[in-house]
Image: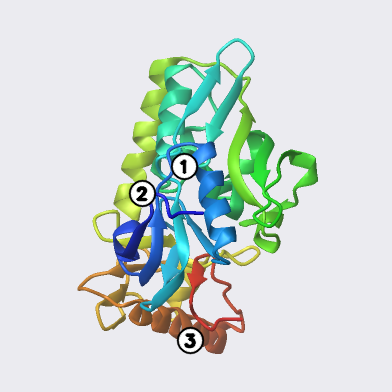
Amino acid sequence: MQKFNQIQENINLKNYTTIKVGGISNYFAEPSNIEEFINLLKWAKSKNCQCLILGAGSNTLIKNINIKKLTICTRNMNKVKIEPKTGLIYAQSGVLLPKLSTLLAQNHFTGGEWTIGIPGTIGGAIYMNAGAGKYSISDNLKSVKVIDPDTLNTFVLSKNEINFEYRFSSFQLSQLIILEAKFYFWKKGNKEKILEKTKSIISQRKKQQPYHLPSCGSVFKNPISNYAGKLIEESGLKGVSIGGAEISTMHANFIVNKNSASSEDVFSLIILIQKKVLQKTGILLHPEVRMIGFDYP
């Protein structure tokens, strides 16, 4: 099987992550539909080449090494279909959450306002069970269309066939790749009020979180009945830096790329935070950021 024209070689993945660090991928492609995605998997399988799936590159830290894989970025797989009468919404894995939030508001649906400030895609959000406050992406999920990269079989999983917990889905323990998702939003509301609420949410987040600097979003999961940012701040780590990476002075659960940080700078801060918080509080913080290429348990 010949290499497709859409496959590029030796691409720097720092341009495809929100924290702007990453390694060099041997092969890279951005399919625009599911058929192209499947063909890329077929090519990789024929070459015995592993795949790395990237969405918006948020919640992701990629080591500055040579990534001997085919990186497939889904951000061009961004089709959405809304059925206003049934409340059903079909979204491909590369749809950005703020786009979903806007489309929901335009169609008078409530319940998705929280997604406005999350810089991730549908696929990544389901994989991580992304959320904000009391809301999670799985709340309105009905089913997920997936593909098994070994057999190249596609099939649909209903929500009750997937295990969702706080910042966890069973996709993290399987090799299945998310292609598309179906959601159900039934509650109708006033469009202007919904848009007003989304504006308020994004305004509040910009005041509390370092949107002006590259980051991978929240680094650690919140422990039960506590907050990672609070524990990190109380451990005296706010503003601490290693190399070009800094624990944000705005929100301690964010590590920002302040001055051409390397992935090792960021990783070193993650380990430092875990060590200091554990020493001070006895609580081991668990990263929610996906670390690729690192020797991390």
Name which residue lies at 46% across and 54% down. 2
130 displayed left or right of 199: right
Position of 287 relative to 56 (above/below) = below
Foreground disc of the pair 1, 3: 1
For marks 1 and 3, the one nearer the N-term is 1
Foreground residue among 76 and 90: 76
- Give the number of the disc on residue 276: 3
For marks 3 and 2, the one nearer the N-term is 2
Mark 1: amino acid: Gly
Q: CA distance from mark 1 to mark 3?
A: 37 Å
207 displayed left or right of 155: left
Residue 19 seen in the figure: no
Q: CA distance from mark 2 to mark 1?
A: 21 Å
Question: What residue is shown with label 2?
Answer: 5
Question: What residue is shown with label 1?
Answer: 94
Position of residue 159 measured from the top left corner of the image (x, y, whole percent) = 74, 40
Position of residue 34 measured from the top left corner of the image (x, y, whole percent) = 53, 38
242 displayed left or right of 285: left
Element type where label 2 sits in the image: loop
